[in-house]
């Protein structure tokens, strides 16, 4: 199995690039952001709890997202592999993902960091806010919370995967097609 963790701050282009990777390598896309937004739209108990955190730009509690991924892996057992987009976002989530994949006789192949400067992230998210309808794109204060959450809780995962020799940094600026090409070249060398 080819299991890729697509990693980066909010607005780095994870969702955008995941589409290229799933097509090129025939993988299943698992985006915790998308799954959570589906739960919110369906007004489930999980969605209602998650919404309280997401709307303010804070991470949803680990237990909720880990359970969601556990269910997705159980329901999609016969895939070539996965692109994990926006998961893991804490070291505890990274440990849980290793356990979940070990249980199905697999492991994370690589973690791919899309590297983008803060000013560019803010520009992209404010631009998206004009059309996305997403509460967490609305206004610099919420976007600032999301970037701060990333720096405090998510960025340390880099060390977790570096220790396993699975960390790869990819420049996340330029055209969408150029960035996709960089990612594909990196994966082809794995
Ligand atoms: P996500 O849905 O993952 O939101 P995100 O970090 O903003 O990523 P997204 O995929 O939407 O955006 P992208 O980088 O593609 O999470 C939302 C919230 O859900 C989190 O804040 C958190 O509350 C919660 N959550 C999700 N997963 C969680 C977890 N595991 N644990 C706890 N909580 C969790 O950026 C896209 C923008 O940039 C687009 O507008 C795109 O058009 C633009 N763009 C992309 N590439 C570009 C390029 N090369 N040039 C210019 N613009 C580009």
Image (spheres, rainbow, N blue to C red):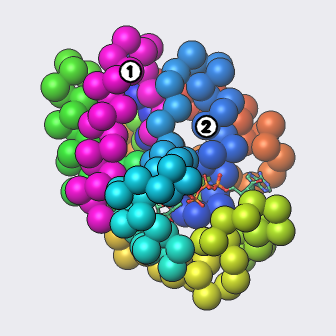
Mark 1 or mark 2, which is nearer to you? 1
Dot 1, how many residues are within 10 Å of its Cα: few (below 14), some (14-19), or many (20+)?
few
How much space separates mark 1 and mark 2, taking CA atoms? 17 Å
Q: Is residue 58 left or right of residue 122?
A: left
In the rendered view, tell whether residue 20 sits above or below residue 143.
above
**Residue at the location (20% across, 48% down)?**
95
Where residue 189 sits: x, y (%)? 52, 23
Q: In the figure, is residue 176 to the left or right of 47?
A: right
The spot of residue 146 in percent (x, y) is 52, 74
The residue carrying mark 2 has its beta carbon less than 8 Å from ligand 1: yes
Q: Which residue is mark 1?
A: 76
Which residue is found at the position 52% from the left and 32% from the top?
Answer: 29
Name the residue that disc number 2 marks: 18
Asked whether 176 falls inside the magenta stretch, the response is no
The range drawn in magenta is 61-86
Residue 70 position, x and y percent, is 27, 37
- Residue drawn at (42%, 73%) of the image: 53
* Viewer can see residue 36: no
Q: Quadrant of residue 109?
A: top left
Specify whether 26 is left or right of 36: right
Please state the quadrant of the image where ligand 1 appears.
bottom right
């Amino acid at each position: 199995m080819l299991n890729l963790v697509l990693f980066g701050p909010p607005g780095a282009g994870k969702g955008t690039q995941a589409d290229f990777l799933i097509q090129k390598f025939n993988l299943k896309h698992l985006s915790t952001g998308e799954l959570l937004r589906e739960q919110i739209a369906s007004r489930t108990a999980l969605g209602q709890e998650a919404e309280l955190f997401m709307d303010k730009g804070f991470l949803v509690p680990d237990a909720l997202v880990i359970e969601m991924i556990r269910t997705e892996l159980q329901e999609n057992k016969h895939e070539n592999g996965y692109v994990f987009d926006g998961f893991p976002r804490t070291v505890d989530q990274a440990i849980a993902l290793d356990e979940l994949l070990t249980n199905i006789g697999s492991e994370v192949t690589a973690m791919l960091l899309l590297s983008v400067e803060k000013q560019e992230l803010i520009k992209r998210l404010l631009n998206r806010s004009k059309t996305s309808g997403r509460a967490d794109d609305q206004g610099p204060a919420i976007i600032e919370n999301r970037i701060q959450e990333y720096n405090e809780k998510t960025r340390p995962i880099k060390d977790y995967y570096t220790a396993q020799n699975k960390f790869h940094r990819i420049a996340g600026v330029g055209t969408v097609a150029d960035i996709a090409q960089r990612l594909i070249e990196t994966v082809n060398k794995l």
